[in-house]
Amino acid sequence: MLSSNKDWGFLLGYRLYVLAFFVFLAAPLVAAGTFAFNDSEFPALPWQGFTLDWFFNDSEPKLGVFHDRRLLRGVYYSFVIAAMVSTLSVAVGTCNAFLFVRHDFPAKNALYILMVLPLVIPGVILGISILVLASSVANTLDDGYGIDIGFLRPGIFLVVMGQFSFITTITSLVITARLKKFDTAMEEAALNLGAGRARVLGTITLPFLRPAMIAAWIVAFLVSFENFNTTLFLVGSESPLTITMFDRMAKAGSTPVLNAMSFLLILGSGGLALLSVLVQRDRTPD
């Protein structure tokens, strides 16, 4: 009887812990999404009534997110940067996967640690380091040789390089994990039948890696789109959404239009995350 009570108490405590954990995670998201529909100029209680003005209204003071040109411009720059970073990261990550899985070379373990290291370095440090390096090179070339290299100044190029410096580690790990499950006997059979290495790569190996590559691209896109710490130090006049929202908060305070944008980002991020899971689950062999 005593053992049964202990088991029941443990089960109850476990369930309460899980419930509290997910409430802690979801409560801020629910609050942000809820105030996006509040008919008030301030994202706070009391509830003034349901409205869609913060999405579709085309005039002040309730300018909707779909008519806010600055926010839409930030979405555009974030999309461009995220697409560039994720594509570049998947390409390099795929090469890294082949390098560390298929080849042995001196200092392989040390180089692998260096590849993973950016994940544990704070984004602020990465941003400052890249900015200092790029600015030093640009200033040296400009002062010493009169060569002005604009892409080494704060702007989209530096933002892409800054995000790429740690996001490529994520894609490398995702694709490496998939490549380790590959049976090289399939490649050997194709080579014995007369197929060239390029054809084997294109028809056997890369199709096997495709689910991981797609999932890695989605994860990289999401991480890039929401990045703030590294981007803050490298951004120029083309401000992505995270910087635009930060500037709006700093100058005008929190407004429901930011809640509306947050609600759309929650839906978009959740949809892409679900797609990433489905891609890997549906195509992973038993």
Image (cartoon, grey):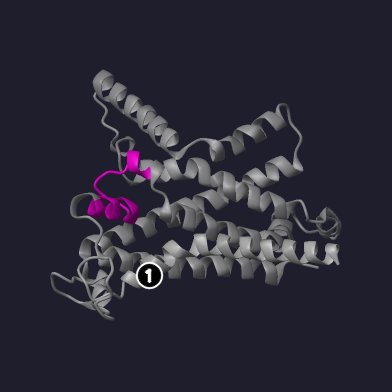
**Residue nearest the observer in this picture, 2 or 62:** 2
Residue drawn at point x = 59 percent, y = 62 percent: 214
Q: Most prominent secondary structure in the magenta stretch? A: helix
Report if residue 235 lies within the magenta region: yes
Residue highlighted by disc 1: 33
- The quarter holding residue 125 reads top left
Residue 129 x/y as whole percent: 41, 30
The segment highlighted magenta reads: 231-249
The single residue placed furthest to the front in the displayed view is 1
Q: Crowdedness of circle 1 by 10 Å Cα count: few (<14), some, many (20+)?
A: many
Residue 151 x/y as whole percent: 32, 39
Residue drawn at point x = 33 percent, y = 24 percent: 136
Q: Is residue 210 visible?
A: no
Report if residue 215 lies within the magenta region: no
In this rendering, the answer to whether 92 lies above or below 18 is above
Residue 52 x/y as whole percent: 27, 79
**Residue nearest the observer in this picture, 176 or 23:** 23
**Callout 1 secondary element:** helix
**Residue nearest the observer in this picture, 248 or 219:** 248
The single residue placed furthest to the top in the displayed view is 144
Residue 92 x/y as whole percent: 57, 46
> In the image, is 39 to the left or to the right of 110?
left
Q: Is residue 262 visible?
A: yes
> In the image, is 132 to the left or to the right of 147?
right
Q: Quadrant of the N terminus?
A: bottom right
The single residue placed furthest to the left in the displayed view is 60
Q: Amino acid at mark 1?
A: Gly
> In the image, is 87 to the left or to the right of 159?
right
- The quarter holding residue 73 reads bottom left
